[in-house]
Amino acid sequence: MDKVSAVILAGGKSLRMGCDKGQMCFKRKPMLDYSLEVVSKVTDDVLISSSNSLHNRPGCRMVEDVYPNCGPASGIHAALTSAKHPWLWVVSADMPFLSINIFDQMFIRRKSHGAVVPRWNDGKMEPLCALYHRSSLGGIDKALSNGVYKMQTIIESIHPRWLYIEEHPWMIASRCFFNINTQDDLYDALVEPDLG
């Protein structure tokens, strides 16, 4: 069976939040630790993409960008370069409702593709909660070296397998792709959804 590594992207500038999101507490726990708890269930190789020593966690490896200041694609690039295993589960540090069930759905769709990326019917993607194969590294490196940093453009260039979110209502109900970028997002995350 293919083995998987995981990376938690924690190197963003958090400009809209105004503070370090990875270290910001959500229900009394740093948000980064929610992602760490989930990815640790599927791998023995957890990387944290950050140059901030406060993000270091026992048993994890810190990785820094080869292409600094180029957005999340550079963190994915660095993690694919350093990962022990051929597949890499990429998650961000601001997803408190992340679920291992998402990984399961991506992993069973991985064959013959360089990535498996969740996608909404309107075309919006979730590239920061996706599965990437080492074979996608060349395409990501080429994009970064050519000054292409937009994740949607990069994703389309590596021809992923799509995981269509609306086909799985539980993904929407569980808010597993919800990420916290602003104080309003933080408030919304603390409010229980009305499922009635």
Image (spheres, rainbow, N blue to C red):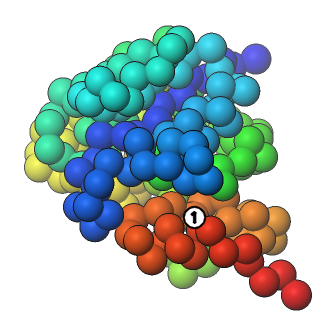
Which residue is rendered at x = 32% and y = 63% of the image?
A: 17
Is residue 147 visible in the rendered image? The answer is yes
**Counting other residues with Cα less than 10 Å from the Cα at mark 1, is it few (<14), some (14-19), or many (20 or more)?**
some
Give the camera-side residue of 166 and 46.
46
Q: Is residue 168 above or below residue 109?
A: below
Q: Residue at x 72, y 48 (%)?
A: 99
Left or right? Give the position of 3 relative to 143: right
Residue found at x 26% / y 61% = 18
Name the amino acid, label 1: Phe
Res. 34 image quadrant: top right
Quarter of image, res 35: top right
Residue 21 picture location, percent across and down: 38, 51
Quadrant in which the C terminus is drawn: bottom right
Q: Quadrant of residue 177?
A: bottom right
Q: Residue most toward the bottom?
A: 196
**Residue 196 as seen in the image, left or right of residue 40:** right
- Considering only vertical position in the picture, is 145 above or below 167? above
Q: Which residue is mark 1?
A: 178
- Image coordinates of residue 96 in percent, x first then y, are 60, 52
State left or right for residue 67 relative to residue 161. left
Q: Which quadrant, please, contains the N terminus?
A: top right
Residue 9 lies, in percent from the top left, at 40, 40
Q: Residue furthest front?
A: 28
For the residue labelled by badge 1, is the local secondary structure a helix, a strand or a loop? loop
Residue 43 image offset from top left, x and y in percent: 65, 20
Whether residue 167 is visible to the viewer of this picture, yes or no, is: no
Instruction: Answer above or below: position of 67 versus 124.
Output: above
